[in-house]
Image (cartoon, helix red, strand yellow):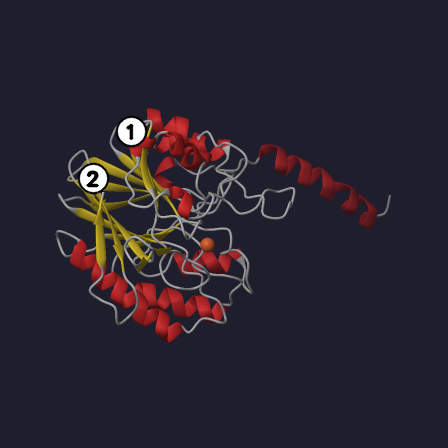
Amino acid sequence: MSKKTLFVAIIPLLAISLSGCSSTSSPSLDDYVSELGYEDGFTILQWTDLHWSIETDREEEKRYLSAAFEAAKEASPSKRIDLLMITGDLALISSKSVLEDEFSFIRSLNVPFGVSWGNHDKQGTYSLSYLDSLASSGQSIYKNVDDDVHGRSNYVVNIMDGNTVKWQVFSLDSNSYEPSGALYSYDYIHDDQVEWFKEESKDVPSLCYFHIPLLEWGDSKNDTTGLKSKEKWEEYEKECPSPKRSKLFEEAKKSGVQGMFCGHDHSNDYVSTYEGIVLGYGVKTGKELYYAHSSTRDIDLIGGSLVILHDDSFELKHVYTQDADGYPSYTENY
Ligand SMILES: [Fe+2]
């Protein structure tokens, strides 16, 4: 055996030996957590489905979002937004320059913000790690932990009263499309994500934010006692969840979840209490793509949604902002 042949023979042995004794460190539960300070009236603004694309008139959209943000602050008892949660589809087959502009605007609001990805965010002329870096910038509480769990936006914000966790606000990635690739068959929140949620949950009230509704949103139609919306549901669009039932709702019932909020179906803005949990569609934020007009109130159902935290309960308001010049806007209390 020549020296060269011996060297080639030793390398694989070394590789086997090294891989045999190495260990990959898995993340700890703390790696998913950010903390914000609690006070009564802590206000969370939900925006959803902004859908910025290369076709978007970005200056007009910024004027609109500024008006929607001011309207939300005005509707908040504290006149303050303490956390902005954006439940996906910030982008629609978009580009780096469009997203940089969008995140630059979000940062300019100067409030902590989080993002839960939608099915359209990952389509565009950029890498997923580029999305992570944008979403992590400024006062972001977004985290994509390097783990083996489905999705990129699974994290939690503990709202702290001193050293005590008062509320937990979860973001979960509802993923995009069903892996078989069937057109418009949406993905769901997988079992490993539910397992992570269960481990991360403390014995305190909590809220969940994600993009694609669970099948329970449709189920809630049969429980009309929980109806909290003015319109008849039938007037708008059929829900578009994954055909697969996630285990999240059943786990949430055991884990102190008081409310779950999604986007995805732009025309739907209904809110229902179903089996003890408030299920809410966020109000679509802006006029990109499609949205609904309420015939009974003669307004476009666009704007944002407010959750106002109290010690062990919350209030919910939908703040409808018509356009950049249409301020002041219309607020619905649930
Ligand atoms: Fe959308």
Query: To which quarter of the image does residue 61 belong?
Result: bottom left
Q: Residue at x 47, y 58 (%)?
A: 131
Q: Residue at x 36, y 60 (%)?
A: 137
- Confirm whether residue 60 shows in the render: yes
Which of discs 1 and 2 lies nearer the camera? The answer is 2
Q: Amino acid type of disc 1?
A: Gly
| Residue marked by disc 2 | 314
Q: Measured along the vertical axis of the image, is residue 198 above or below residue 35? A: above
Q: Residue furthest right?
A: 1
| Residue marked by disc 1 | 256
On the image, the x and y values in percent for residue 106 come to 33, 63
Q: Quadrant of the N terminus?
A: top right
State if disc 2 and disc 1 touch (CB < 8 Å): no
Q: Residue at x 42, y 74 (%)?
A: 57
On the image, the x and y values in percent for residue 26 come to 47, 37
Query: To which quarter of the image does residue 135 belong?
Result: bottom left
- Confirm whether residue 277 shows in the render: no
On the image, the x and y values in percent for residue 133 come to 43, 59
Compare residues 163 and 62 and report the one nearer the observer.
62
Drawn side of residue 134 relative to residue 82, left or right: right
